[in-house]
Image: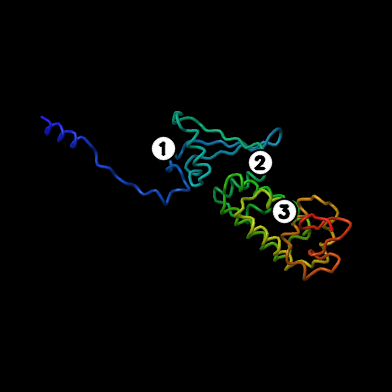
Amino acid sequence: MTSSSSDSDRRSQKPRVNIDLSHNKSIPNPPPTEEAAHREINITIGRSKKVTTLRSDEGALAEFPYFRARIASIRYGLHDATIINLTFEDIDPEGGTQVWNWMHGTTVKECLETKGEFGLQFRIHAMYVVAVEWKLEYLRKKLLVACREMLESGIFGDIHGFVKMMTHVYSISPQEDQGDISDTINYAVKYYPVSKWWWIIKHDNEHSFYRRVAGLTFRNLDELVCTKCTLSTKPKHHGCIICGEKC
């Protein structure tokens, strides 16, 4: 009887299957089924009177790990027919819309088509903020490449404004992106005469985050500026623009 019971137990047990999911570590959930791929997703961006609502289907968003994980966490326990609504109040509607367009096939160049240099800088900044929020690493790299191409072509006349914009981008970006951002700011030195913009940077704001980052990112300016403005000098009337310490 013991032997028969043991044989029966062995027959009822299913063989164990080992599945290697190491290639899929960055995407914690499987893609949606064919039926689920067509379910509607609504994204609301902005707050107050500046609000934009974008619509897509789950299949289009499944390619992006951030959205795939977030949708899966909301879907858990809900009926399949439920429409998901995602809200991002702190994202600028223009930046969110352009990133949405990029996620659905529009090129970065097309997303950045706008009138005026100020409008271009604003759009780059707005898109980059969204790319950080939605963890779109590839888009962040594409935006930095676009910035370098624009620097080469001389599109940015207000280099001070460009550096200020990129400094904020630096402050909100993950550490792995900061080296590329710093290099992009330094890239401007190759294409813009220092004498035309260096004097615009204020040296009298002792605790300015902008000034400290500018000192670090313009580390190669010692060979390009006069003794009075050199980054290695610590003037007595204010602190060092790199470390903030006074003489």
The CA distance from mark 3 to mark 2 is 18 Å
Label 3 neighbour load within 10 Å: few <14, some 14-19, many 20+: many
Image side of residue 81 versus residue 237, left or right = left
Number of the front mark, 2 or 1: 2
Q: Quadrant of the C terminus?
A: bottom right
Q: 243 or 56: which is nearer to us? A: 243
Number of the front mark, 3 or 2: 3
| Residue sitting at the far right | 237
The CA distance from mark 2 to mark 1 is 31 Å
**What residue is pinned by disc 1?**
35
Tag 1 or tag 2, which sits nearer the N-term? 1
Whether residue 37 is situated above or below residue 139 in the rendered picture: above
Q: Position of residue 94 (x, y in %)?
A: 67, 44
**What residue is pinned by disc 2?**
91
The CA distance from mark 3 to mark 1 is 45 Å
Q: Amino acid at mark 2?
A: Ile
**What residue is pinned by disc 3?**
167
Label 1 neighbour load within 10 Å: few <14, some 14-19, many 20+: few
Label 2 neighbour load within 10 Å: few <14, some 14-19, many 20+: many
Tag 2 or tag 3, which sits nearer the N-term? 2
Image side of residue 8 versus residue 189, left or right = left
